Amino acid sequence: VLFFLTCIAFKMMEIIIYITCGAILAFILYSFLNKKKDKEDDASVLSTQLSELSRRFTVLEEAAKQMGSMQTSIDTTFKNFQNMLDDKQERGAFSEVELEKLLRDRLPSNYLKFQETLSNGKRVDCLIDFGDANSRLGIDSKFVLDNFKVFKSSESEEEIKKYKKLFEEDVMKNVKKISSDYIIPGETAPHAIMFVRSESVYRSIQDSDVDLMGKAREKNVLIVSPSYLWGLLNTLRVFLKDSEMNKKAQMIIKEIGMIGKDIGRLVERTEDVEKKFNLVADQFRNIKVSAEKIQRRSEKIVEIEGTNIPSIEKEDK
């Protein structure tokens, strides 16, 4: 739509340029016809005006060439874009890129696993991993556009009915594939998400008479558009913040408990050291008492040696 609007804008600019040129030419001719003065002055004015007109036409010609070049570039770009939408692989890659951008913008990268291969050998566009096996949520992009375009462009009632049914079958085929490939008991969450890149396709799925959304839910598949997924991811983001806060609080409580246990062990060891210290102190006191007794006895011995004790030799005489 943007490309078509740009093309229309350039066409309108081109028309405005030509109208402006016509107005300038008419003004010059009007001025020329209304001036009845001297012939030489008229010739001089005419020559000046014709020169100015020639210069302006040159500028306009250059602008027209540039517009033509830009138009060619726009046509080529639009054609390449159209070819990309017509090619299933290109279309799928485009949808996967958009899904990845949306997920990376809303969720922390440590929860996202892109192109994850499951135990059944199937590769999902993204696995939102919350840590637990039963909370690993698979999300896969699907671009059900082929029969949808024919369905929307059909005019007869018969064609509308035919291609609408084919479009609904395409949707359910992808729902069943996601349900069988990306929901594995004991490995993933019991639900999966189908991402539809086009909002118009998503609205057609919502408005379906056969309740495609309900049938998808029966297969444990939630169909989402970019806007729906954006809201869902915002909710998950708030949940993850609360979960992270709870985990950090639990971690702090656990660490406080460990510190308490360490302090308890430190008190016990301090008491043991105190007991051993007291025992050593008692032993030192006992040693001191024994040393004091020995000292006192030594002093008595010294005193005895200093007294006048009759010698043995005198008694013998």
Image: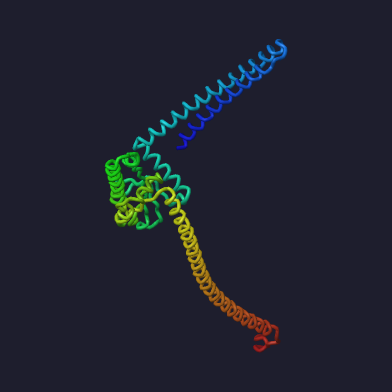
Rendered location of residue 24, percent (x, y): 61, 22
Q: Can you name the residue that lies furthest to the top here? A: 40
Q: Is residue 119 visible?
A: no
Picture quadrant of residue 54? top right
**Numbered-mark total:** 0
288 relative to 206 in the view: left or right: right
204 relative to 47 in the view: left or right: left
Q: Is residue 8 above or below residue 112?
A: above
Q: Is residue 148 above or below residue 62?
A: below
Identity of the residue drawn at 41% across and 56% down: 130
Front-most of residues 109 and 102 = 102
Front-most of residues 115 and 36 = 36
Identity of the residue drawn at 52% across and 30% down: 12
Rendered location of residue 34, percent (x, y): 67, 18
Front-most of residues 11 and 234 = 11
Rendered location of residue 184, percent (x, y): 30, 54
> Colour scheme of this structure image?
rainbow
Q: Is residue 276 above or below residue 251?
A: below
Q: Quadrant of the N terminus?
A: top left
Rendered location of residue 155, percent (x, y): 32, 39
Picture quadrant of residue 191? bottom left
